[in-house]
Amino acid sequence: MEEIGKILPRVFERRAAQQDAGLSEFLAAVWGRVAGTAVAAHSRPVALTGGALTLAVSSAAWAVALRKMSEELRAAVNGYLGRAAVRKLRIVVSAGSSMAEASAPNARSYEVRDETVARLERTLASISLFPKG
């Protein structure tokens, strides 16, 4: 009897040969294994269109963190898939309170772009947590 870890890649190779349509659902099912449990607890793949993987995240803080890790995540996903299916990550913050709600068709969300991350970093850098006294 073979271990599941040895069987899944073969099963997935057949699945990956199909269109991107079902790929996000597959990634959602194995997201903890691909991205790690901490990231998976706060994010979920919701769509893959034209090489752009959309991840719904639970908060703006997680959106910023995943934007900073986007290249590592993209490489992890492509490594798991065994092909360069993901060229770009799109991070959206879900207005729902749970990751299950984030994948609902009517969930409200907003995208955190590079410009937003840069603006937040500049703002945080200008704030002194320890005022001179």
Image (cartoon, grey):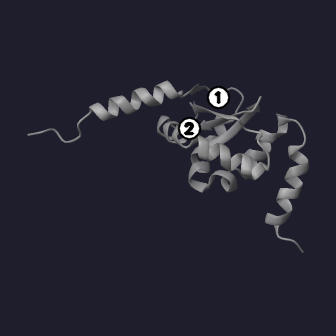
Q: How many marks?
A: 2
Specify the quadrant that holds the N terminus: bottom right
Q: Amino acid at mark 2?
A: Ser
Q: Which residue position holds label 1?
A: 107
Pointer 1 with pointer 2, Cβ within 8 A:
no
Q: Earlier in the sequence, mark 1 or mark 2?
A: 2
Residue 4 vs residue 106, the one in the foreground: 4
Where is residue 121 shown, x and y percent of the image? Answer: 39, 33
**Which residue is located at x 57 percent, y 45 percent?**
42
- Tell me the element at label 1: loop
Residue hosting label 2: 97
Number of residues whose C-alpha sits closer than 10 Å to that of mark 2, classed few (under 14), some (14–19) or many (20 or more): few
Q: Choose between 113 and 100: the one closer to the eye.
A: 113
Residue at point 49%, 37% (across, down): 64
Residue 93 placement (x, y as % from top left): 56, 32
Query: Mark 2 falls on what kind of element?
Result: loop
| Residue 67: image location, x then y, percent | 54, 37
Give the percent coordinates (x, y) of residue 107. Answer: 64, 28
Amino acid on which disc 1 is placed? Ala
Quarter-wise, where is residue 44 in the image?
top right
Q: CA distance from mark 1 to mark 2?
A: 10 Å
Q: Nearer the viewer, residue 5 or 95?
A: 5
Q: Residues within 10 Å of mark 1 (few under 14, many from 20)?
A: few
Residue 53 relative to residue 94: left or right = right
Q: Residue furthest bottom?
A: 1
